[in-house]
Amino acid sequence: MKLFKALVPLKKHLDQQNLTSLGLVPTMGALHDGHLALVRKAVEENEKVVVTIFVNPTQFDDQKDLDAYPKTLEDDLEKLACFGEKIAVYAPEVEDLYPKEAVSEHYDFGELETTMEGGSRKGHFQGVATIVQKLLKGFMPTRAYFGEKDYQQLAIIHALVQQKELPIEIVDCPIVREKDGLAMSSRNRRLNEKQRAIAPQIYSLLTQVVEKKHTHSIEEINRWVTAFFEQQAEFELDYFCIADARSLQPLRDKNTTQNARAFIAVKMGEIRLIDNVKF
Ligand code: PAF
């Protein structure tokens, strides 16, 4: 497994191999089993895979959050070593991807970016689209792999690829959970012992929401979720919403679509966790 700090030599390395297919797995590092599931799938489906490790500054609207984001390159490389020569790792400094200034491009994703994460994290998806476009155009992979935990991000990336007419297959990969149900996330390692012990309640709440599907209206479910969090000192609810899985617009009536998902974001102290399930 080779590590590259710059795009140009990595592109040269790949071009020399006359590949029939290339997979791309963009990450911000602090790798966990969820990331490794993406890499495994990419390795199964492509002749060669590039895993990128880059904490993208333009998608953070809060400098404190950016500074606190775990950076664990050595540990990440150890986790990836088992994939051997099938993968190459690209872990650049900011200047390699943003040679002038680390600022976002401008995109119009319409309603897709105004709800949920877009409402809570100003400019977040403009930053995500900027870096994903750079990586997709830089490597022009056959397929690129993203997890459904960041479901709204995935919808934005599908829209980006369509708008820019990039001939790249975006592969949606299911959420990987800890044994107790907590969705795997690089942010989980920042939870203290007490927070980690109760964090699985987020997923347990979502499964109860799904159970209420046939007996409660969406308004009743929304009220039930709000009441649950009013009694929880450790959690601060950012948003909960049952939305159409394509448009991501909140639903008022559960009978308007067969294709709905329940989305949630909560804060535990400084740490923000998100999750979603099919509704
Ligand atoms: O999901 C992530 O880890 C990031 O948002 C991504 C897609 C690697 C872009 O920085």
Image (spheres, grey):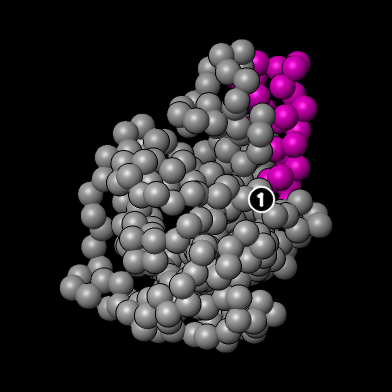
Of residue 268 and residue 59, the one placed in the foreground of this image is: 59
Q: On the image, which quarter does residue 145 sit in?
A: bottom right
Q: On the image, which quarter does residue 228 sit in?
A: top right
On the picture, is 28 further left or further right than 82?
A: left
Residue 133 shows up from this direction:
yes
Judging from the image, what secondary structure is the residue with disc 1 in? Answer: loop
- Location of residue 39 with respect to 198 vertically, above or below: below
Residue 186 shows up from this direction:
no
Of residue 207 and residue 128, the one placed in the foreground of this image is: 128
Residue appearing at x 72%, y 39% in the figure: 205
Q: Position of residue 131 (x, y in %)?
A: 35, 61
User: Which residue extends farthest right?
Assistant: 179
Q: Is residue 220 magenta?
A: yes
Q: Which quadrant of the figure contains the N terminus?
A: bottom right
Categorize mark 1 by other alpha carbons within 10 Å: few (<14), some (14-19), many (20+): many
Q: Amino acid at mark 1?
A: Ile
On the picture, is 50 further left or further right than 59?
A: right
Q: Position of residue 22 (x, y in %)?
A: 50, 64
User: Which residue extends farthest left?
Assistant: 100
Residue appearing at x 75%, y 36% in the figure: 207
Q: On the image, which quarter does residue 119 sit in?
A: top left
Residue for badge 1: 175
Residue appearing at x 30%, y 46% in the figure: 164
Of residue 122 and residue 41, the one placed in the foreground of this image is: 41
Magenta residues (range): 199-226
Of residue 212 and residue 171, the one placed in the foreground of this image is: 171
Q: Position of residue 96 (x, y in %)?
A: 30, 77
Q: Which quadrant of the figure contains the C terminus?
A: top right
Q: Main secondary structure of the magenta part?
A: helix
On the picture, is 144 further left or further right than 64?
A: right
Q: Position of residue 40 (x, y in %)?
A: 67, 65
- Location of residue 81 with respect to 182 vertically, above or below: below
